[in-house]
Amino acid sequence: MRNVARIKLGYYPLPHEEAKRLRKLLEFSAGTTSVVDPCVGTGVALHQLTERAETQKYGVELDANRAAAAAASGIATIQGDLFNAVAKGESFSFLYLNPPYDSEIGSMDNKRMEFLFLEHTYRWLVEGGILLMVVPQERLHSSIPLLAENFTDLRVFRLTDPESERFDQVALFGVRKRMRGQDYSRNRAGLHEMVWRRDIPMLQGNETPYRVPASAPTRLVYRGLPLDQIEDLIAQSCAWKQIEAPLLPKEEMAGGRPITPLHAGHVGLLCTAGLLNGVFGKGDDRHIARWRSVKSVTVFEVKEKGYTEVHKREQFTNELALIYEDGRTLVLRDKKREGGDAERTFADGAA
């Protein structure tokens, strides 16, 4: 996973328009129905998928802020690791899975998170319960054996929202039912063909719906450690106080003037190390400074004695970008470019 995705914990919520189309494929029974989202986020998707249905909503979310938002929206939410959350088997009628797009490293043999989330939660569905799984198309391959053995009436649709197309997302529907013998073999062969076909049908919202059976209220139980509370208490522990000094030595601030004037190489090292970045100034002159070192490559040819030599010359220059509170921007470089370094102000409505 890219670093940006890791910062988001692999969190890519379901686009609103896709949720509206998927909702049309779910026909909820009269009476109360228990539904669960093991990667609930802020809870928006689960609310959209169960709109106008009488449901008891449950969810698990690793991020504390998103978990708080989901709980505030009326979802019974556990904040923590899904793999420490347990529920009674066959207790939910609808399972919505949009798991992180990443691989688990270490204790789970580097398996895809999409498969691990499904493996941990599919037993929570009642017989005849509905699974909705939103994942990139290529990530379904590892889950084919499990899906073929435990679900029937499987269908795969391609999502068409621009954000969904970016990740090549598909939606898989299935009805919980144990498949054995020849039924399993046929189910697996059919699912394999559906997953790898190039012309997967696009989700329109007018397809034959799945009927979600009723189910009684249930419970999700968390057996893991309360991570936030532990983190708060670590700093107060005796063990931490003993190891803090050797692990985190006090920073010594050097003062005084440099022995020799700084030249471009010194400035380049400081700026690329991030030591010259920060917030400076007051009032109208308050701004963010962001330094970086830019490499440019010049290619030139030298012809000698019947052959041509191609030379590449690398040159590093320093660049400073300033962003002011009022929206003005200014870029300073070693060499001025075509008016691009002049101070700029955002036009009305731009941001």
Image (cartoon, rainbow, N blue to C red):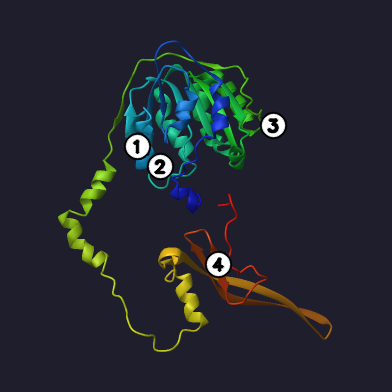
Question: Nearer the viewer's eye, disc 1 or disc 3?
Answer: 1
What is the crowding at mark 4: few (fewer than 14 residues within 10 Å), some, or many (at least 20)? some
> Residue under circle 4?
330
Cα separation between marks 1 and 3: 40 Å
Query: Horizontal and vertical percent for residue 217?
Result: 34, 18
Label 2 to label 1, Cα distance in Å? Answer: 28 Å
Residue extending furthest toward the left: 238
Toward which corner of the image does residue 303 lie, by quadrant? bottom right
Q: Quick one: 280 or 173, which is closer to the camera?
A: 280
Per the image, the residue denoted by label 3 is 199
x then y, percent, for residue 185: 57, 23
Neighbour tally class for label 2: few under 14, some 14-19, many 20 plus, Cα within 10 Å: few
For the point 32% across and 36% down, the residue is 84
Which of discs 2 and 4 lies nearer the camera? The answer is 4
Q: Earlier in the sequence, mark 1 or mark 3?
A: 1
The residue under label 2 is 108
Choose mark 2 or mark 1, whichever is in front: 1
Q: Residue furthest bottom?
A: 260
What's the residue at 59%, 72% (across, down)?
Answer: 295
Determine whether label 1 and label 3 are within 8 Å by CB.
Answer: no
Q: Earlier in the sequence, mark 2 or mark 1?
A: 1
The picture places residue 129, in percent across and down from the top left corner, at 46, 18
